[in-house]
Amino acid sequence: MGSKNVQKLRGKKQRAIYLHHLVRDLEALELLIENDMFEKSPIRIGAEQEFWIVDKEFLPNNNSLQVLKEINDGHFTTEIGNYNLEINTDPIVLGGDCFSFLHRDLDALLDKAKNAAQKSDSRILLTGILPTIAPKHTTLDSMTAVDRYFILNEAAKESRGQDFSIHIKGVDEVTMLHDSVMLEGCNTSFQMHLQVDPDEFVDLFNWSQAITGPVLAACCNSPLLFGKELWSETRIALFTQSVDIRTNSLLLNENQPRVSFESKWQTGSISDVFKDNIARFRSILTADFDDDSVDLINKGEIPLLKALCLHNGTVYRWNRACYGVGGGKPHLRIECRYIPSGPTVTDQIANLAFWVGLMKGIPNKYKEIHTMMDFKDVKFNFLAAARYGMAAQFHWDGKLYTSQDLLSEVFLPMAKEGLTKVGISENDIEKYLSVITKRIKSHNGSQWITKSYRNLLRTKKPDAALQVLTANIFLHQETQKPVSEWEVLLPEAMSNFNITKKVHHVMSTDIFSVEEKDSIELVAHMMKWKNIHHMPVIKADKELLGILSWVDVEVLFENGDSTSATVKSLMKTELITIDQDSTVDDAKALMEKHKIRSLPVVRDNKLVGILTSNDL
């Protein structure tokens, strides 16, 4: 978001002041362009590394501020989730062994984070969506205790006027309403920056859109959310919906969400890219602005364009135009925001090298890509990649390609030529592009996670499988071997860590339930068909009201008295229940004490599972 001292934009006077500074920033931007004041060389690259902090059982650990304080390094900053942090790397001049240098730099910074985390029994993990994150980790209790996140949340909620609606459908499906923007905290990314010559900016910005789909397909790493197998890169759908401040009406849904792909090619100037964001997306935050940007230019000073950057920081384009000042000189960057974190630093640097190579290796015939491709084909490619990853097919240059063919035959040679053109060493080119080549032939992170999770589910309940999966991601990550070399986990795979077995590891979540008004006759047949001994009785919102035992139902059914009887007349309402985070030993003791063979598992009196003696 840039500025840390933000406020919710409210009132006519405050809005007028902010919009005045925003317009003056645009005027200043145009003056910088007209007077040829932007830095054109050397070209630099950079990255933002978001990562997870997990506890010893590989669950999200709400201690980011404690870890940040222990790290004590200005490269690190907070994220909205109190289990995430971000590293901002120093800009590096593009050329020579710059990618190896950035690799070493990022390793050193992550080592700082690991050492700091170890002091509070925590670990650092790189992955787009943490497999073990659950809805209970996305409440305001898990929001980082920094004012600007709460201000952003309040501004987004006020603008939307209703809960945030999440609906993502893949092999499985997640549908939920959420009362904050905290689902954004489920996502971590590796954001890549490339400084761009102002004279080439619009052409390269369009080119960055065109290559998005195929690049994403090679880099997908986030197929799971809350144990559900969704998109190959579920982050794309989740981030889009988690901060969507449009209301649910047919009229307003014609607008773009705040997290979005572009809707058209850019054909104007650099300032038109920023103007488009201002015209399409209402400002929701403000800050204190000391100086007029145009006045600063007239005095021979370089403005920071704070109002423009603040607005730009609340519009989350997957490819974003950025303005910055470094060493007293203004520059322009294109920020690639769609690449997930992980699975290893090696994979991430390979992704950066591949993307930069493509950006700098644009063939002359594609420099006016907007005249060659329909933008809807570009957007189709992006969504296909997000949904299907390496199984996607892409429209490119009038043909339909498989992802493997397009990446191998067209994109990799183009990236190699681009890296050679800007003077990258042969060693770096081979080292990092070979990672992409092997990934295309073997599997990306999303494919490895999906195959491994499916195998683990053959021998484990979902939560246990997710913890074993996450533990093994951590172990593989520490080897620094790229994901293409990871062996898919076998069904009997375990972790080498001492994870306390809890109720949610062994309980059944695929359960049948009934309501009070249902007839005993139907319920009796259901219990016989499915060999169910205990049937929970719930309300529409999953609140647990009671439980039916087959012993009680069978007597009524066998006597022929079940036709007119309802569930309410027979269910037990004095219930022994257990929390999903209780230990298995606690559950066993409770069953033995009360001489029962089944325990409803509840959270806030809502049914989340059933634990039976067979499960134990």
Image (cartoon, rainbow, N blue to C red):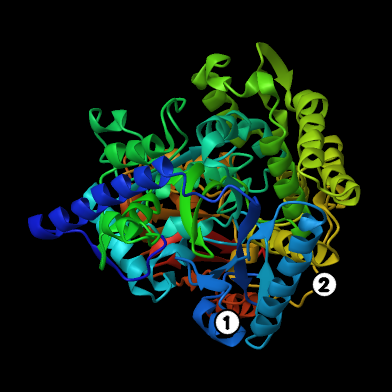
Mark carried by residue 359: none
CA neighbours of label 2 inside 10 A, class few (<14), some (14 to 19), many (20+): few
In the displayed structure, 517 sits above or below 577; it is above
Closest to the observer: 4 or 110? 4
Residue 56 seen anywhere in this rendered image of the structure: no
Closest to the observer: 579 or 146? 146
In the displayed structure, 298 sits above or below 366; it is below
Of the two numbered discs 1 and 2 in the rendering, the one whose residue sits closer to the viewer: 1
Q: Residue at x 59, y 28 (%)?
A: 210
| Residue type at the position of mark 2 | Asn
Quarter holding residue 179: bottom left
Residue 192 seen anywhere in this rendered image of the structure: yes
Q: Residue at x 45, y 32 (%)?
A: 262
Residue 347 % position (x, y)? 77, 52
Residue 525 % position (x, y)? 50, 39
Closest to the observer: 293 or 401? 293
| Residue type at the position of mark 1 | Val
Write down the residue under mark 1.
67
Residue 157 % position (x, y)? 26, 55
Q: Quadrant of the N terminus?
A: bottom left
In the picture, measured across the screen, residue 350 lies left or right of residue 3, that is right
Are the two marked residues, 1 and 2, in contact with CB atoms closer than 8 angstroms?
no
In the displayed structure, 69 sits above or below 374; it is below
Write down the residue under mark 2.
496
